[in-house]
Every structure is written in structure tokens, then in C-alpha cells.
Image: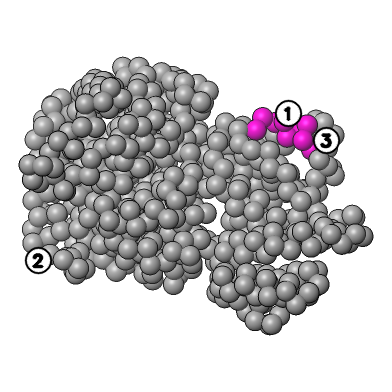
């Protein structure tokens, strides 16, 4: 049945996947084992994305399925003392001052979440001081700045400057993403990287967090 | 008619010729002088030659997308631009005086704020309505239509927009949820129930607001129209007139939202595809009507969710391209030249998007590799673009000139190319814009 579940997730058979999880629960399968199957399936989805067979719609759909499975498993998991999810790393994310677009940011947040990261989304039109304040309290490994408009260039630059002035820059990786972002704007704003799409953002976070002392 | 807009109609060519003649004649433009008229006609000819691919134009037409740049350049605020129409048009006059482009880019993208206020418009936020004075208006994407409502949209798009969508995006039109269903009003007993909603105080108020918003829009239109003609009278043809969209984007941008529409590809595949088909004739007619109103022939279609990264090639071919192509053919049949503005990058789509009749459309690219675009579709469509915004906003004039030189060398080879910006150039450094225009007008001469 585990193979069937993984296959259902990998091929986006939402209802079948959820039904199989319910059946596994009925047979008293360990919820953590079920989650492992799901993680494996997500790995395959990721590989297919890298191979160019899957695109954003499949990642979103697989993420949706995984979220629903987690919701089914949650009561069982919290009933098991001593075991808990460990999050892979912390990411603070927001749309910079002046820009109120949230779609790109929301997609990146969602994909980071289903990839096991702890995400704090601080919303849209976020002033530099607010980024600084949130970094202090949340202590993320990575900060993601989103912006669709060209006015975001200077807002991102100002945010990086504020983070530097607060003495927080050295402990952080910062990435940017959005319609008119590029490597040129990475250099202009002084961040570590530009992700050309949501998945590139997730890959950046994975690479960085793996290389960081936890 | 299921097979409508698959192949272009036999008289499309002739209609396009007539449209170009009418555009070139500049019938309603009050030319400053015979020289201004000759200049105007010369510029229309440059564009016509670039579009039709029949001969190499005298030089590359230089048609940057002004976007909202004229507002910041003139130093007016966003609320001034949206509420004070004289300031708005002054900003556009100043832009066209100071930058020697080949075309007029009108201020019609800056809509009258008061009309939006009157109707309590929720689909965007703007200066004075949720945003600060220095912020340009911005789209608020939400799931305005539930997935369960697909069938209602398919059954009756007009009714759906009137009674479901409008009350959500115009709070002032909330009473429209009681707007009667129109096709059944065709027999005497059906008249009274159709009249009843219009007698309620709420509906009367909504109708009054619409009237006031209409009056306000006329004031804006008069000011914008007058100034536009004046600027054009100096010898500048308008680059575009009219607007339409890809049916998939109508649903993805404005009804279901990005997340919604991407998941619908799996959960509501058939309904999504049928809805795109249902929206298609509206988008054809929308482009034709807008061009008729503006007296222009190049409707502008900003494309969003078909870009690289949003979906696979197979999904693009299934969900996005078929109905966009129908819209394009429908417009081409009317003698129009759709400007298909591919925001983001379209490198993965180049094999597909050249499937259009030769010399009938413009592909305006943002970040697409122009060398590849030229090779893949340059023999079928005029390509345009793609001076990058990041360069214009943060680079130097030398960087810009270097980029334009390479762009003209590759994309401009043997004609079929219009130099433009990757997107509306708000945030650009004025010196960079000047460098782009002045250099390209000189370097773009075909010798």
C-alpha cells in the first residue's frame, strides 16, 4: 500500500492518496512511517521537476496533497509523546516596502513549508525596520525579500543596509525574487542570491541551511 | 461555431492593409505642420514594415514602453496623477518633449481615481486608497471566484460577471447580485420580475454611482484625449490602442488567482478549459471594440501565467496557447495587429508561439533570449523588446548602449524588429532612457 500511496502522490492523484492514508491509519500504520513515504514521494516530485518533467503546478499540487495528509496525521502524531517534527531551518519572508504583491511570496512560503522549513511570513509593504525587528525575534537562517515592481530595487537595498547597520547581516543569508529581479539586482542590493522562480528560492534555502551550523 | 478562429480569414490581409492606410493617414490628428504629418507617416511606415516582414524598414523603430515613468520624471505624485487630469497629461507632455521616441505612449493606463472611489473598487489599491502618494497602483490578487462556480461562469459569463464578480470587486455595485438574468426576458410575463430589482433603493443608488463614475470618466477622457491628439500632432503615432488578454489569464489573474488556477489544472481541468473557451469570444470582441474606439489597430495583450516556470510545455499547449491563439486570430481577422507582450521569459515557448500567420502580430518580449526568438519566430512575427528594466534602473548609459547595440545586431537583423523596453520603464534613470533612444535611432538605420 505504501508504494501505491507514493505513486498516487507522484502522479497527483489527490483523492486516491488521501484515501490510501486513511486506509493505512485504519491498519494502525505508524504515522511517522506514512510521513516518510510522503517525503520520499516529494523527493521524486522534486527530481522530476529538476529533470524538467514537472513544473510549478505539480509542485503546488503535491504540496497541497502533503498538507492534507499532514492534517489527517496530526492528531495521531501529537498523541505520541517524545516524537515531534524537527524543522529543517528557519526562513523569514516578506514583500519589501512600497510593494503590496503577495502571490510570489505566498508560493515560496508554501513550498518552503511543505519542504519542512519553519517560515515566518511578515506580509507585504514591509519597512526595513520591521525586517530588522523580526530578524531579532525570529532569528532566521535565511531572509527572503519579494518584490514585483522596480521600486522594490531601492527598498531591498535599504532593507539590506538596515540589517547591516543592526549588526545582523553576518549571520544571515538573504535572497530576493520577483518579476523584475535579476543577478544584476542581487549585486545592486547587496544580497546573497536571486532566485529566478519559487523553486530556485527553495533550492537556495536548502543549500544554505545544509551548510550552516544548526 | 466550434472551428472559429483556427485559420485566418481570407480577407484578413486586405483588412490589415486598409487599417494601416487609415492609421497612416492620421485622419483625426491635428498635425502641427506638414512636416509633423510627414514624420508621423514615416514612423507608421517604419512600424508597418517591421510588422509585415515584407521589406526591411529604413531603420529600427524605437518604441520604449513609457509605463509610469512620466509620473516620476515630472515629479508629480501618484494621487495627483490619478485625481488631477491636467497634471497627468502635463507629465505625459513633458515626457514626450524630453525623450525622442518614435511613438506616443498614452496616459490611459493611469485611470481616474475618483471613478474607482465612487464604485469602491477592490481589485486594485492606489494612492489615496490604501497606498501612499509615492506608490503606483497595484493589483490585489485573490480567489474572487470559487472553484465550484466554474459552471456558472461557463453557463453565462455576462451574468456571472454582473451578479457575482462585480459585487466582489466593486463594493458600490453590491446590489448587482440581484441583477436579473437577461436572456430569459423575452415574453410579457417575464418583464415585471426583471424590472423589480431596479425599483429598490439599493439598486437605484448603485445605478446613480455608475452614472457619476461615468461622468467622471468622461472628464478624464476629454482631458487625456485632447492632450494625446496634441502630442500625436507633433508627429508621433500612438504605439497601441486597445486591450485584451489571454483567456487563461482572465481566469488565472482576475477570477481564480495563481494558486487557484494552477491547482485547477488537476482538480478542475475540464471546467478550466471550457471556461477559457467561453471567455475567448469576449476577448476577441473586447480587443476589436477597444480598437474601434481608439481608431487604432494594435491592441495590447499583457500575458502573465504562460511564462516559463509557471507551467510545462505540455500544459502551455493544453491550457494556455489554444485560446490565446484564437484571440490572436480573431483580432487578425479584423485587420488588427495584436501586440503579445510576454512578460517574464518565453524561452520554452518559442517552438509553439510562432504558429501564427506571417506578418500579422508582434511578440513583445521582456526577458526572453532575443537571439533564440529571432531564429525561432523571426520569419513569422515581428519581435520587439527587450531592453531590461534592471539595466535601465541601475546601470549606466554605456551599459545601455552596449546592450542596445547587441540587441539591434541580433534581433534587428534584416528588419522585423521594434526596439522597446522589457516592461513599462518606471524607475529607470532618465540618462539611460535617453541613451537607449538616441543611440538606437542612429545605430538602427539599415544601410
Give the CA distance from mark 3 to mark 1. Answer: 11 Å
Give the CA distance from mark 2 to mark 1. Answer: 62 Å
Q: Secondary structure at mark 2?
A: loop
Using the rendered image of the protein, determine whether residue B375 is visible from the camera's viewpoint.
Answer: no
Circle 2 crowding by C-alpha within 10 Å: few under 14, some 14–19, many from 20: few
Q: Nearer the viewer, residue B272 or A165?
A: B272
* Relative image position of residue B353 (x, y in whole percent): 34, 65
Give the CA distance from mark 2 to mark 3. Answer: 67 Å
What segment carries the magenta color? A126-135
Using the rendered image of the protein, determine whether residue A136 is visible from the camera's viewpoint.
Answer: yes
Q: Chain of mark 3?
A: A
Disc number placed over residue A129 in the picture, else none:
1
Classify A3 as above or below B298: below
Circle 3 crowding by C-alpha within 10 Å: few under 14, some 14–19, many from 20: few
Q: Please check whether the numbered discs 3 and 1 fall on a single chain.
A: yes
Circle 1 crowding by C-alpha within 10 Å: few under 14, some 14–19, many from 20: some
Q: Chain of mark 2?
A: B
Q: Are marks 3 and 1 in contact (CB under 8 Å)?
A: no
Amino acid at each position: 500500500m505504501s508504494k501505491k500511496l507514493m505513486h498516487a502522490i507522484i502522479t497527483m492523484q489527490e483523492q486516491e492518496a488521501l484515501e490510501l492514508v486513511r486506509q493505512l491509519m485504519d491498519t494502525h500504520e505508524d504515522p511517522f512511517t506514512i510521513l516518510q513515504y510522503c517525503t520520499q514521494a516529494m523527493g521524486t516530485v522534486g527530481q522530476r521537476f529538476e529533470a524538467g518533467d514537472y513544473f510549478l503546478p505539480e509542485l503546488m499540487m503535491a504540496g497541497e496533497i502533503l498538507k492534507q495528509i499532514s492534517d489527517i496525521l496530526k492528531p495521531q502524531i501529537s498523541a505520541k509523546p517524545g516524537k515531534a517534527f524537527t524543522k529543517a531551518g528557519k526562513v523569514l519572508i516578506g514583500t519589501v516596502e512600497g510593494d503590496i504583491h503577495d502571490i510570489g511570496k505566498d508560493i515560496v512560503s508554501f513550498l518552503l513549508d511543505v519542504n519542512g522549513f519553519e517560515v515566518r511570513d511578515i506580509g507585504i509593504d514591509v519597512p526595513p525596520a520591521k525586517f530588522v525587528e523580526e530578524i531579532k525575534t525570529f532569528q532566521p537562517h535565511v531572509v527572503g525579500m519579494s518584490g514585483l515592481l522596480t521600486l522594490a530595487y531601492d527598498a531591498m537595498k535599504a532593507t539590506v543596509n538596515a540589517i547591516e547597520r543592526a549588526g545582523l547581516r553576518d549571520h544571515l543569508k538573504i535572497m530576493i525574487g520577483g518579476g523584475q529581479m535579476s543577478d544584476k539586482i542581487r549585486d545592486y542590493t547587496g544580497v546573497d542570491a536571486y532566485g529566478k522562480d519559487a523553486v530556485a528560492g527553495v533550492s537556495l534555502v536548502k543549500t544554505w541551511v545544509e551548510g550552516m551550523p544548526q | 461555431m466550434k472551428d472559429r478562429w483556427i485559420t485566418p480569414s481570407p480577407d484578413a490581409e486586405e483588412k490589415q492593409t486598409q487599417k494601416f492606410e487609415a492609421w497612416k493617414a492620421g485622419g483625426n490628428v491635428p498635425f502641427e505642420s506638414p512636416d509633423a504629418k510627414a514624420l508621423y507617416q514615416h514612423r507608421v511606415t517604419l512600424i508597418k514594415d517591421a510588422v509585415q516582414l515584407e521589406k526591411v524598414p529604413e531603420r529600427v523603430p524605437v518604441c520604449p514602453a513609457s509605463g509610469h515613468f512620466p509620473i516620476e520624471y515630472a515629479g508629480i505624485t501618484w494621487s495627483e496623477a490619478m485625481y488631477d487630469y491636467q497634471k497627468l497629461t502635463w507629465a505625459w507632455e513633458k515626457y514626450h518633449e524630453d525623450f525622442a521616441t518614435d511613438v506616443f505612449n498614452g496616459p490611459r493606463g493611469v485611470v481616474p481615481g475618483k471613478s474607482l472611489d465612487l464604485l469602491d473598487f477592490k481589485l486594485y489599491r492606489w494612492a489615496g486608497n490604501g497606498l501612499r502618494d509615492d506608490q503606483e497602483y497595484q493589483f490585489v490578487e485573490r480567489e474572487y471566484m470559487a472553484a465550484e462556480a466554474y459552471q456558472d461562469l461557463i453557463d453565462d459569463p455576462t451574468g456571472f460577471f454582473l451578479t457575482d464578480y462585480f459585487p466582489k470587486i466593486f463594493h458600490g455595485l453590491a446590489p448587482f447580485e440581484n441583477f436579473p438574468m437577461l436572456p430569459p426576458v423575452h415574453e410579457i410575463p417575464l418583464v415585471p420580475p426583471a424590472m423589480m430589482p431596479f425599483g429598490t433603493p439599493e439598486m437605484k443608488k448603485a445605478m446613480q454611482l455608475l452614472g457619476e463614475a461615468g461622468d467622471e470618466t468622461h472628464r478624464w477622457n476629454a482631458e487625456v484625449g485632447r492632450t494625446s491628439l496634441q502630442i500625436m500632432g507633433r508627429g508621433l503615432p500612438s504605439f497601441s490602442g486597445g486591450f485584451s488578454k489571454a483567456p487563461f489569464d482572465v481566469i488565472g489573474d482576475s477570477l481564480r488567482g495563481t494558486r487557484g488556477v494552477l491547482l485547477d489544472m488537476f482538480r478542475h481541468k475540464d471546467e478550466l478549459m471550457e471556461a477559457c473557451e467561453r471567455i475567448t469570444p469576449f476577448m476577441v470582441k473586447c480587443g476589436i471594440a477597444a480598437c474601434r474606439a481608439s481608431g487604432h489597430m494594435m491592441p495590447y495583450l499583457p500575458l502573465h501565467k504562460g511564462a516559463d516556470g509557471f507551467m510545462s510545455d505540455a500544459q502551455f499547449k493544453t491550457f494556455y496557447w489554444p485560446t490565446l491563439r484564437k484571440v490572436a486570430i480573431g483580432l487578425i481577422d479584423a485587420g488588427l495587429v495584436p501586440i503579445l507582450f510576454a512578460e517574464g521569459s518565453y524561452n520554452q515557448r518559442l517552438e509553439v508561439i510562432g504558429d501564427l500567420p506571417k506578418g500579422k502580430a508582434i511578440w513583445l518580449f521582456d526577458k526572453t533570449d532575443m537571439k533564440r526568438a529571432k531564429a525561432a519566430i523571426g520569419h513569422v512575427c515581428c519581435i520587439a523588446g527587450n531592453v531590461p528594466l534592471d539595466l535601465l534602473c541601475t546601470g549606466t548609459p554605456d551599459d545601455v548602449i552596449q546592450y542596445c547595440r547587441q540587441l539591434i545586431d541580433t534581433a534587428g537583423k534584416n528588419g522585423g524588429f521594434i526596439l522597446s523596453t522589457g516592461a513599462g520603464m518606471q524607475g529607470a534613470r532618465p540618462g539611460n532612457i535617453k541613451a537607449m533612444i538616441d543611440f538606437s535611432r542612429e545605430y538602427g538605420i539599415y544601410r
